[in-house]
Amino acid sequence: MLLTSLAAPRRRPFAVLRRMLSAYWKLGEATGAARLDSTANHNGLTNNNNCAQVAGKIGFGTGFVAANSQSLSVASNATLQTLSGDIFAAGWFNLPTGSLGANQNLIAKGTSLSSPSLLDWFLVFAAGGGLRFGVSNGASFLSATTGSPTVNVWSFGMGYFDAALGVVGVSLNGGAFVTTSGFSGTPRSSTAPVTLNGALGVAVPFATNSMDAFAVGKLSAGTITARAAAIRDALWNGGNGVEIY
Amino acid sequence: MPTLQETTDAIDAAFAGLVGSIQQQQEAYRAARGRYFQGLWSHAAPPADGASAVPDQLTAHPDYQAESWADMQGFPATTQARACCDQYRGPAGEGYVFTMQLLWQGTLWQRAVNFGPEDYRDDGWVPSA
């Protein structure tokens, strides 16, 4: 029923899901160009160092080369800040052979992948494998981690934070959410930028990979847990992916 | 041995002396190439504890760009920090960020100077987390 409600009515497919979004990036624009935000929030991504247009999960995506220090970024604003609500991030990615040995940022809000005082939330691959989503209270992280993806194929990941329950969850390729509970304190909600691949801060590694169709959304506190599976299933779309704009 | 403050002051002074040349060369590069120049890190490792080091990566370049620091004029023979220059194109326009890094007693410090519409990229000397 929830999946149906996210996609209905047919005349306005994904209308419910769209209302949850802070940003939605198709990521298929030309090499070197900015990446447009399909929502009305004007969170278009700046192209740092000539990120390329590559074959994507659906149409075109964005390719990153670590040696070129390539990333996409957008300055912070209230639509991207956790504030006191729930948040989720989801998208498609394709990792090359040999890429799973180090921390890799898929999407994060912050300027570090290691310091909770510099990072609000993140969806990353942890060194040693595993897709990880987490949030910071400024002093420590709470995160949840799935198994490792397969390289050289498109994979789908989604993470969420339920501010009322103090729970984070992460799902890989439409699988059940792995959750961790016990968040305490207030979610860090800084003015740090949101970055796809690498980050603008000190000593954050860049990665070589491709990404497509990324979404960030916010909901009222305590509502994401009941909706997370429906959001995941709508975007995963049975492994086919979908562009909701 | 100089202090960290003395070292960053000296780096800032040297950079201030180069800003005009950097901007002039970047605008010429953009006029010719349609975008700003990207320079990779000038040194493989950041200079440490105020010591000056010879840049050993001046011929390195991103794979989409033929030019390197060696094609630009005025890069000092030795520096107390390494430097890179990232170029960007965003919804508000184009720009570039000149970033300097050094090691001080094992901690990485960095300063970023933005030239372009994305002012939030400016950052003073801050330590690595």
Image (cartoon, rainbow, N blue to C red):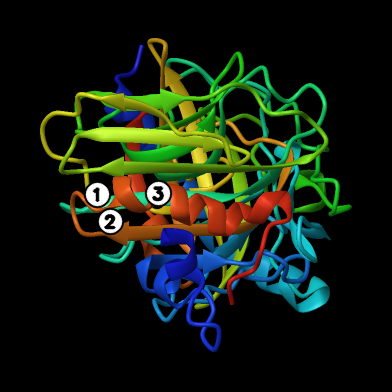
Q: Is residue A43 left or right of residue A131?
A: left
Is disc 3 on the same chain as disc 2?
Answer: yes
When the figure is inspected, residue B57 is found, relative to residue A90, above or below; the finding is above
Label 3, secondary structure: give it.
helix
As measured in the structure, the alpha-carbon distance from the residue carrying label 3 to the one carrying label 1 is: 24 Å
Looking at the picture, how far across and down is residue A120, in whole percent? 30, 41
Q: Which mark is residue A71?
A: none
Q: In terms of image quadrants, where is residue A234?
A: bottom right
Q: Amino acid at mark 2?
A: Gln
Looking at the picture, how far across and down is residue B44, in whole percent? 68, 23
In the rendered structure, are the residues bearing label 1 and label 2 in contact, judged by CB atoms less than 8 Å apart? yes
As measured in the structure, the alpha-carbon distance from the residue carrying label 1 to the one carrying label 2 is: 7 Å
**Which residue is disc 2 drawn over?**
A81
Mark 1 and mark 2 lie on one chain; the one further toward the N terminus is 2
As measured in the structure, the alpha-carbon distance from the residue carrying label 2 to the one carrying label 3 is: 19 Å
**Which residue is disc 3 drawn over?**
A228
Q: How many marks?
A: 3
Q: Chain of mark 1?
A: A
Identify the residue at horizontal 69%, vertical 71% (top origin). Answer: A33
Q: In terms of image quadrants, where is residue A99?
A: top right
Label 2, secondary structure: give it.
loop
